Image (tube, grey):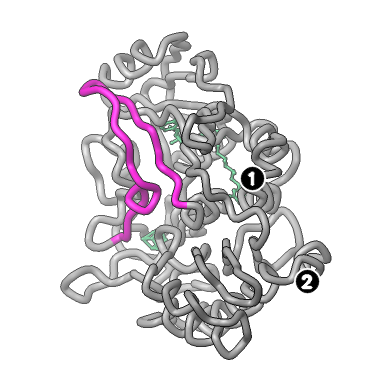
Amino acid sequence: MHPFSYARPTEVTEAVHELAGPARAKFIAGGTNLLDLMKVNVEQPNRLIDINRLPLNTIDELDNGGLRLGALVTNADTAYHPLVEQRYPLLSQAILSAASAQLRNMATNGGNLFQRTRCYYFYDTAMPCNKRQMHHSDQITGTGPAGCGALGGYNRIHAILGTEASDGTVHCIATHPSDMAVALTALDATIHVTGPNGDRTVPIGNLHRLPGSEPQFDHTLRPDELVTAIELPPQGFPDHYTYLKLRDRSSYAFALVSVAVGLEMDGDVVTNARLALGGVAHKPWRKPEAEQLLIGRTATREHFQPVAEALLEGAVGYGHNTFKIDLAKRAIVRALGMAINKEKREEGE
Ligand SMILES: Cc1cc2nc3c(=O)[nH]c(=O)nc-3n(C[C@H](O)[C@H](O)[C@H](O)COP(=O)(O)OP(=O)(O)OC[C@H]3O[C@@H](n4cnc5c(N)ncnc54)[C@H](O)[C@@H]3O)c2cc1C
Ligand code: SF4
């Protein structure tokens, strides 16, 4: 493992200052992703800034009826918090579908957002990988040959949407791995960030990015910024929701395809709809035009299918992952049915 120095600040300003210091410094929270990447030399920080002593570990009610989740609250404490369970059960369900109880006890809300792709070629420095190789002074990767091992390789877990750069070329077909981020996208969360230039907020839909011709960048945060909290708006869809996660094993596995749904209903008629997909793109996939197709419609299968078609418009398969296009459409129709029907949701059907 590459040698590194270590700091453990207790104030947010101190942590941000530390990051702006020597090159290749990196925050560490739960360490459940970063340490794995360091062990295989994919991440090689010169300095680790342990943020676990920062005062960012509370969940607070907001005056507008929303909730503020501290960046250092663990995934377990978030999922089981009574206010999250009551008002945002979609988020609890998504978090609890991820990893294992032990990992969720260590993993933090901030770290979860920035966990890196599970593309097998990204983890293997002997294989070509543009995400790992395309070096940037702020990035700490840059090992191994350039190219994309997955494009002509075994790409069963890879992306089917948003893979092309503006000139039609494809540099990376990795997917974003976080389940929590998919639920946060459906909930329209806001990310609170601080850096040397002060505080700012980023809508969750703008936090992660598509690979384009710069797949080395997973997200839009500046290299010297720290996430302090995640803000949930008042509408949490507690009556009609589901997080459907399809995977090769029923636990302890990442999503092949996942669907987060939140609906508001007036009798049988949908009055508000949110859908986000995981496992299909370099970021959680949301398309408000597809959601609009449901508004004012009765919640029946015939009205669900066009939503699935609209969300998957433009999808491209790369061989081993082509099955995902059909799987995602079926998952959307099924998830909408589950969100409406409480009994089915509780049976996990
Ligand atoms: C075996 C296994 C199975 C898993 N299965 C799933 C799964 O099914 N679904 C799923 O969603 N996840 C899964 N995970 C991933 C797990 O959820 C993440 O590793 C975890 O959420 C990362 O959080 P952390 O606090 O440990 O982050 P760390 O590993 O500490 O950090 C991750 C990254 O985030 C950055 N960072 C951390 N906090 C902040 C902050 N506040 N501001 C800015 N940057 C920050 C770090 O610099 C680092 O780059 C799995 C992990 C393992 C090991
Ligand atoms: S899909 Fe992306 S992360 Fe995977 S090998 Fe290709 S460039 Fe690397």
* Relative depth, front residue between 329 and 256: 329
The residue positioned 50% from the left and 41% from the top of the image is 232
| Quadrant of picture, ligand 2 | bottom left
Question: Would you place residue 98 above or below residue 11 in this image?
Answer: below
Q: Which residue is mark 1?
A: 87
**In terms of secondary structure, where does tag 2 sit?**
loop
Could you tell whether 89 is left or right of 327 in the image?
right
Q: Residues within 10 Å of mark 1 (few under 14, many from 20)?
A: some
Amino acid type at image mark 2: Glu
204 drawn magenta: yes
Indicate which disc, 2 or 1, sits on the residue closer to the N terminus. Answer: 1
**For the point 55% across and 54% down, which residue is it?**
183
Quarter residue 75 falls in: top right
- Asked if residue 107 lies left or right of residue 49, the reply is right
Residue at the limit of the structure toward the bottom, as seen here: 302
Q: Which residues fall within the magenta stretch?
A: 188-211
Q: Is the C terminus in the top left, top right, bottom left or bottom right quadrant?
A: bottom right
Give the x, y percent position of residue 5. Answer: 42, 15
Q: Is residue 28 above or below residue 171?
A: above
Q: Name above or below for residue 270 compared with residue 81.
A: below
Foreground mark, 2 or 1, reads: 1
Q: Which residue is mark 2?
A: 349
